[in-house]
Image (cartoon, rainbow, N blue to C red):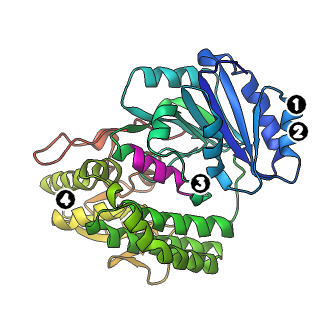
Amino acid sequence: MSATPRISIVMASYNRRDVVLATLQRLYSLGAEAGGCEVIVVDNASADGTGEAVARRFGGVKVVSLDENLGSCAKAIGVDQAQGEYVVFLDDDSYPRPGGLAAMVAKFEGDSQLGAAGFMAHLPDGRCECSALPNVFIGCGVGFRRSVLQSVGGLDRTLFMQAEEYDLSFRLVNAGYEVITFPDLHVDHLKSPRARIGERTVYYDTRNNLVLVARYLPAEYESIYRADWNQRYGWIAESAGHRAAYERAVVDASQRQQEDRSAYADRRLSPAALEQLFRLDYVDGWMASLAADGARRIVLADLGKNVYPFVRSAERAGLEVAAIADDRFTGPQRVYRGLAIQPTAEALAHTPDAIVISNTSPIHAARTDKRLSNVTSAPIHRWFGHDVPKERDGMPPARETGAPACP
C-alpha cells in the first residue's frame, strides 16, 4: 500500500480465503494512516487458493506462501519480510477501527519504553477478549516497534498456537519494556463463537502453558504454577471432552521440561518482571489492607489462571477463605489447594465479610464484579480500579493496564 511504509500489518491464515479477503477489504481504507502501511499475509499452505486469491485481488499485499502450516506463529515469518518501523499483528478476521493505527504510533512516540501496544479486542456479542495476566497482549490486535520485537527474538514459531502471546510478553517485560493494553485502541474481532473447545486448542493450550512454566518461572514458583496449570487445563479438557489431548500434552511438555529449563536458564523472570506479570507482592499488600480494615472471613470469586497469589496472601494476612466461587470450574469434590470450589450461590451462603475477586485479568475481574453486584450486597473487592490501595512500605506500586471492561 506504500513504497516506504511506516507500519507493517502481519497476519497468518489457513484455508480461510473468503475471511482473509473480507479483512483485507476493510484494511484497504487504512492504508494512508500513520504514514502508510504495508500488509503481509502468511499463507499456511492453504488448500483453498488463499494466496492466489489475495495476490489477484490485492496486488499491493505481500503474500508469503509456506509449505506447511505453522499456525498463528507463522506471523514470525511475515515479520522477516516487514519493512515498517512498527509491526502490527492481526488475526485474519480482525481489523483496527479507523484512527487506531495513528493513535498506536502516538503511544510509541510518547513512551520510549513501550514495547507492545495492545488493542482492546471487541467480539460481535459485545464482549472483549483479554489475557489472563496483566501486561500480556492478545495476538488479534497488538503493535510493536519492529526493532524491539526483533531484539527479544519475536514469536516462537515452535509453539504453533496458544500462549505464544504470553511467551513473547514475558520476554518483553523481562527485557525492561512495557506491555500495555490501551482503552483507546480498538480492533474488531469477528471470532465465531464455539460451543466446544477443539481438541487441538486443548493440546496446545496445555502443552505451551507448561512450557512457559519451565522456561520462565523462578525455582520457588515453578512447581506451584506447574501444579496449578496442570489442574486447570485438565479440568478445561474434561469439560470439553478432550481428556486424551490434555494427557498427550502433559507427556509432551514433561519430555521437554528439562531441555526448556536448561535452554532458558538465563531468561528466568527477574523479580521486577515476575511482579509486573503475576502481582504476588502487590496482592500481599492489598490483602493485608483488607485484614487491617477488619475482614476475617472471605470468599474468593473466580478460579483465575493466577489465583495463587490470592490464596497465599489470604493465608499470610490471617484471612479465612470459606470457598472459591466459580460456576465454570465447580464439580464434585473439586478443590484448589484444599479450598472447595463451589457454585456462586453456595459460596455466598458462607456470609463472608468480603468477596475478593481472585482474577488478575482486569476485564474478567470487572465482569465478575458486575455479575456479583447483582446477586449480593456483601462488599466486593477487586485488585485494580477503585480498590487499588496506596503504596505501602515493602509493596511496590503496580502499573495499571488501563483496560476497562466491555459493556
Closest to the camera, between mark 1 and mark 3, is: 3
Closer to the chain start, of discs 4 and 3, is 3
Residue at image mark 1: 57
Residue 52 belongs to the span the image colors magenta: no
* Marks 2 and 1 in Cβ contact (< 8 Å): yes
Q: State the image quarter where residue 347 is shown.
A: bottom left
360 sits left or right of 247 in the view? left
**Amino acid type shown at disc 2:** Ala
Q: Name the residue nearer the viewer: 318 or 188.
A: 188
- Residue 357, x across and y down, in percent: 36, 56
Q: How crowded is mark 2: few (under 14 residues within 10 Å), some or many (20 or more)?
A: some
- Residue 84, x across and y down, in percent: 59, 26
Residue at image mark 4: 295
* Marks 4 and 1 in Cβ contact (< 8 Å): no
Residue 179 visible? The answer is yes
* Marks 4 and 3 in Cβ contact (< 8 Å): no
Q: Name the residue nearer the viewer: 148 or 292.
A: 148
Quarter placement of the C terminus = top right
Give the CA distance from mark 4 to mark 3: 48 Å
Write down the region rendered in magenta.
Answer: 162-172
Closer to the chain start, of discs 2 and 3, is 2
| Magenta residues, dominant SS class | helix
**Which residue is at a point 87% across and 54% down the rendered structure image?**
47
**Amino acid type shown at disc 1:** Arg
Residue at image mark 2: 53
Give the CA distance from mark 4 to mark 2: 62 Å
Residue at image mark 3: 157
Please tell me whether mark 4 sits on a helix, a strand or a loop: loop
Closer to the chain start, of discs 1 and 3, is 1
